[in-house]
Structure formats: C-alpha cells, structure tokens
Amino acid sequence: MEALAVVSVCGILAAATAPSVRGISEALKLEGDGQRIAMALTQGRVSAINRGHVVVASFTSSTFTVIDTQNGNEVLATGSLSPNLTLDATAPATFSPLGTVAAPVVVTLHRGADTRTVRVGLTGMVEIE
C-alpha cells in the first residue's frame, strides 16, 4: 500500500515538472542556435582576414551559410535552426579582407515570444545578447 502511494506521488511530481523541463529544453535550443550563428559569423570574419578575401554570411528564415566569394563561393559554414525557431537578419554580413563590415548586421532568433540577438559591429566583432 505504501509503495502504491510512493509511486502515485512520483507520478504526480513527474507530470508537474515535465512542462518546465520542456521549457528549459526549448530555451537551450534558442541559446545553442544563437551560439552556432555567432561561431559561424566569427569563422567568416577570421577566414576573411586570414585569406585576404571577401566572405559573406547570408540567412534565410531557418538557415545560415558562410561563403568565400573569392574562392569559387567555397562554403565555409552552413547550418539549420532547431525546429520551432526562426530568424531574421537586417542584411547579409559581408566581411572585408580586414574583417570589417560596411554596415552593422543584426540577426534575431525567435521562439515564440523569446528572442536571442546576434550583432556584428562595424569592426566585425560578433556579440550575443
């Protein structure tokens, strides 16, 4: 009888905590995808400097691609967002051979009301907010 009570209490607790665990998992996907995009942008900047080439990072609502435009459009990085996430960007990030961009770029990831913002400043530095 006591074992049945313990199992019942455990079941109730598991059911109560499942939604919060799911919420944490979704928040981690948003954070992880923000980190991946920031790493791809940083890789693009470093490649532009090291190679002395123009490197462009472009975005769709669910993917990103970084290419070396002076090496036959060689793909340096590419990726897709986790399910239920979308992104929008103010423009492609075009890194000069000095690692700078002509205009700041803002990439915003969305999961419902939650957002994560990745910014590329004029100097080419990448920040996550």
Image: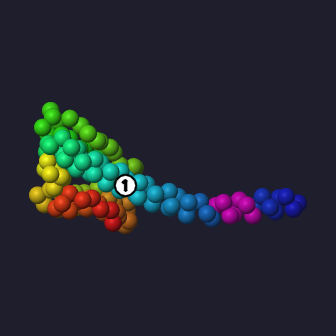
Query: Looking at the picture, how far across and down is residue 89, in whole percent?
Result: 22, 57
The residue sitting at the front extreme is 50
Q: Image quadrant for the C terminus?
A: bottom left
What amino acid is at disc 1?
A: Gln
**Is residue 42 found left or right of 30 in the rendered image?**
left
Query: Can residue 108 be seen in the rendering of this structure?
Result: no
Indicate the colouring scheme. rainbow
58 up-or-down from 109: above or below: above
* Label 1, residues with CA under 10 Å away: few <14, some 14-19, many ≥20: some
Query: Looking at the picture, how far across and down is residue 100, in whole percent?
Result: 16, 55
Residue placed at 13% from the left, 60% from the top? 103
Residue placed at 38% from the left, 65% from the top? 114
Q: Image quadrant for the N terminus?
A: bottom right
Q: Is residue 11 magenta?
A: yes
Q: Quadrant of residue 74?
A: top left
Label 1 element class? helix
Residues shaded magenta: 9-15
Query: Looking at the picture, how far across and down is residue 49, in whole percent?
Result: 19, 47
Q: Is residue 74 magenta?
A: no
Residue placed at 73% from the left, 61% from the top? 10
Query: Can residue 2 be seen in the rendering of this structure?
Result: yes
Which residue position is annotated with label 1? 35
Report the label total: 1
Residue placed at 83% from the left, 58% from the top? 4
| Predominant SS along the magenta part | helix
Query: Looking at the picture, how far across and down is residue 120, in whole percent?
Result: 23, 59
The residue sitting at the right extreme is 1
The front one of 121 and 64 is 121
The front one of 41 and 46 is 46
**Is residue 129 found left or right of 51 in the rendered image?**
right
66 up-or-down from 26: above or below: above
